[in-house]
């Protein structure tokens, strides 16, 4: 059956992600009407994904009378927060970058803060009866080539070195196989900090909590201009919000924002989803609910669903200078994700792929996010999740709420707060560089997976970002 793409999988972007369609069907809520007047508020938040909604949540937890307005161009969760893989994953595998940037003590504080967020997301779901399929079953790293086994060993060694040996343990090929059997997997590592969620149910649940608390949420309301003032003025097509402080929570859309655009590359990521096949999952022993990924630079990540499907993402993606169709309608990227799935799970050969979707991720020069404020001291932002924003956005929401309120807390002293991000070159150099790099990385990943030496040029190019001081690539 070739790649076995049927139905929605053949026409990505023509509808919302499977997660969001399920969530909208379960919730039955109407979209909130667009802003059609001029308003005054205490805080205006641009963007209704996890970052914007968590920030509104923590602000109103701390100061219930605060007038918070959320302005969302689409519907809340219409962006990546309603389309992601649902990996709420720990940062222990990021220790290398964290230590390079901040030193071991601060790196561990950052990892612990993310672990707290993973726990807290589950607790919030319990407290507010949000059934977002939260399941804390850990994260399996499965090596598909010899160099990746070495990467696993290094990850485990670093966790041990910073005094957290329980967070990441090495797995033999047999141990990997027991959790999820693929003929492509070798040894690996297991990180206990990892929970799967149904991403759209989480973001829509958050929206519900905010509406119940009386937070003003306007959907279908793109902010076309944000002046810092003070007070800040957020202008939309039919109205404006004036507030002393504003939060920019627009994720990869920040490439259109002055002051932020050089801090990220917008990169597409695509997922495919199989038909339910619980009996096949049982055959390969993948019934524990673990999050799984390989260790390629062009990472492939996959998880199961409650009804026995596999949601499988990654394997390439592309950069673009504007958020347009290439982030949602790229059939080639869907085919690449599907091809990765077919290679790793040959026993699912006759299970069709029934859905596919994509979205933009905000790749920072350090592979890690920062939370802070712009030169105009009343504009706050979180940026650079680099495809790992589910748990970090919860932390960002708390940090931004503290920064906006002027509170001096443990969280505002985390190392990624108020840190400069390394700038990328301006366009068109940035997109050209990203395209060359992408090809090199994929060539290197493929060669390694086939047990060959990567071509010298591809290898040199793939290592170039690190030589230039970015924490990207191998
Ligand atoms: C396919 C895919 C898979 C992913 N998988 C994972 C994963 O498994 N685990 C993980 O941790 N992360 C994953 N991510 C990344 C994760 O989804 C994001 O990091 C996270 O959702 C960021 O939340 P956010 O609120 O900052 O951004 P978003 O959810 O993108 O929200 C930003 C919002 O701002 C709105 N907006 C933009 N411009 C304007 C404007 N001018 N005016 C008003 N509103 C505006 C957008 O419509 C959007 O709704 C994935 C991403 C993709 C695309």
Image (cartoon, rainbow, N blue to C red):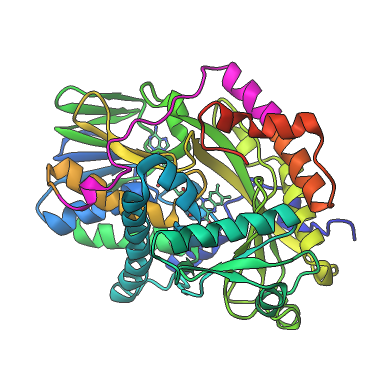
| Residue name at image x 61 percent, y 45 percent | 269
Asked whether the viewer can see residue 72, the reply is no
Q: Say if the magenta span includes residue 432.
A: yes
Q: Which residues are magenta?
A: 409-437
* Residue 192 x/y as whole percent: 48, 71
* 384 left or right of 19 in image: left
Q: Is residue 427 above or below residue 201?
A: above
| Residue name at image x 35 percent, y 66 percent | 121
Q: Say if the magenta span includes residue 146.
A: no
* 342 left or right of 436 in image: right
* 25 left or right of 2 in image: left
* Residue 243 x/y as whole percent: 16, 33
Q: Quadrant of the N terminus?
A: bottom right
User: What residue occupies the far front of the structure in this picture?
Assistant: 161
* Residue 450 x/y as whole percent: 84, 52
User: What residue occupies the far right of the structure in this picture?
Assistant: 1
Asked whether the viewer can see residue 132, the reply is yes
Q: Is residue 378 above or below residue 405?
A: above
* Residue 132 x/y as whole percent: 44, 69
């Amino acid at each position: 059956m070739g790649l076995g793409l049927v139905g929605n999988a053949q026409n990505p972007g023509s509808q919302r992600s499977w997660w969001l369609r399920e969530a909208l069907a379960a919730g039955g809520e109407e979209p909130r009407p667009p802003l059609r007047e001029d308003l005054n508020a205490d805080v205006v938040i641009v963007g209704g994904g996890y970052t914007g909604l968590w920030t509104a949540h923590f602000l109103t937890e701390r100061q219930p009378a605060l007038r918070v307005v959320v302005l969302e161009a689409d519907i809340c969760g219409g962006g990546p927060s309603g389309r992601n893989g649902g990996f709420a994953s720990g940062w222990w595998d990021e220790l290398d970058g964290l230590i390079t940037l901040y030193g071991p003590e601060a790196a561990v504080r950052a990892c612990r803060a993310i672990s707290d967020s993973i726990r807290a997301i589950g607790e919030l779901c319990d407290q507010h009866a949000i059934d977002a399929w939260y399941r804390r079953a850990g994260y399996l790293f499965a090596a598909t080539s010899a160099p990746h086994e070495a990467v696993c060993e290094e990850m485990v060694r670093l966790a041990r070195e910073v005094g957290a040996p329980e967070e990441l343990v090495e797995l033999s090929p047999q141990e990997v196989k027991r959790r999820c059997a693929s003929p492509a997997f070798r040894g690996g590592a297991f990180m206990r900090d990892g929970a799967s969620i149904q991403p759209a149910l989480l973001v829509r649940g958050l929206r519900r909590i905010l509406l119940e608390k009386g937070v003003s949420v306007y959907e279908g309301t793109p902010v076309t201009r944000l002046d810092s003032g003070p007070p800040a003025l957020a202008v939309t097509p039919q109205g404006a919000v004036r507030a002393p402080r504003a939060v920019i929570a627009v994720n990869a859309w920040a490439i259109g924002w002055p002051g932020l655009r050089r801090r990220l590359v917008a990169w597409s990521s695509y997922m495919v989803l199989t038909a339910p096949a619980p009996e096949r999952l049982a055959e390969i022993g993948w019934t524990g609910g673990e999050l799984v990924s390989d260790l390629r630079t062009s990472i492939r990540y996959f998880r199961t669903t409650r009804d026995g499907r596999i949601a499988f993402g990654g394997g390439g993606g592309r950069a673009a200078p504007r958020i347009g169709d290439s982030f949602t309608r790229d059939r080639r990227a869907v085919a690449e994700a599907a091809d990765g799935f077919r290679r790793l799970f040959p026993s699912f050969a006759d299970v069709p792929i029934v859905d596919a979707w994509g979205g933009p991720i905000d790749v920072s020069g350090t592979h890690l996010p920062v939370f802070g404020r712009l030169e105009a001291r009343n504009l706050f932002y979180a940026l650079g999740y680099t495809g790992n924003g589910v748990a970090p956005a919860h932390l960002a929401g708390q940090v931004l709420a503290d920064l906006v309120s002027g509170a001096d807390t443990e969280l505002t002293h985390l190392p990624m707060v108020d840190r400069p991000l390394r700038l990328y070159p301006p366009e068109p150099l940035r997109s050209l560089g990203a395209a060359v790099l992408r090809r090199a990385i994929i060539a290197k990943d493929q060669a390694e997976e086939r047990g060959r030496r990567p071509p010298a040029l591809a290898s040199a190019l793939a290592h170039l970002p690190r030589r230039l001081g970015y924490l990207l690539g191998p």
